[in-house]
Amino acid sequence: MNILAVFILISALSGVLSGPLHASCKIDWQFGMECDAVMTKLVNQIKAMGGKSGCANGGEKCLYELTSSTSAQITAKHTTPVKGYVDDLTFTFKGGKTSNPCQVHGYSTSETWYAVLDFGTNYCNLENLIIGAGLNSTSGYSETTSDSICTQYSSADCEKY
């Protein structure tokens, strides 16, 4: 498929889709704990899901890679086990390390330039880390996203992706 055909397809889909024109997801969370604790849990979870063990039975809770961690941001990559697609993940922390409650902006985007639909994979890239780290069960937890900023969010199946 040539570039012009892809552009025409994306333009046509933009009228049909209510979400981003590129496979991606934005989420805002609030956690009832200090940001340094949230950061530690996320970094540990990314490392724990770095191997292939979570790929069993067709799952995608695996092949995460930590690329950087600072006092304000964590970046990582997730590779899908079957097709080898790579998504870039960013967790940006609002406020300082001791901010409580901790507010985090998450973003996942496909490195594949022509990706439009993703079956909620970019949502699951982020959500699987939050759930795996147990952050969704902390007091003061909230999550905000929608189909308009998160590709196929409402139909995401994070048990699969």
Image (tube, grey):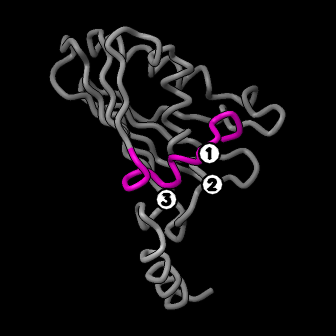
Q: Are marks 2 and 1 in contact (CB under 8 Å)?
A: yes
Figure check: 11 above or below 157: below
Residue 142 position by quadrant: top left
Figure check: 103 above or below 148: above
Quadrant into which the N terminus falls: bottom right
Residue 105 position by quadrant: top left
Pointer 3 or 1: first along the chain: 3
Q: Which residues are magenta?
A: 146-161
Residue position marked by numbered label 3 in the rendering: 23
Q: Residue at x 53, y 26 (%)?
A: 46
Q: Amino acid at mark 2?
A: Tyr
Figure check: 60 above or below 152: above
Give the number of the disc on residue 79: 1
Q: Residue at x 84, y 34 (%)?
A: 57
Pointer 3 or 2: first along the chain: 3
Quadrant into which the C terminus falls: top right
Give the number of the disc on residue 85: 2
Q: Residue at x 35, y 28 (%)?
A: 69
- Badge 3 crowding class, 10 Å Cα cut-off, few under 14, some 14 to 19, many 20 or more, is many
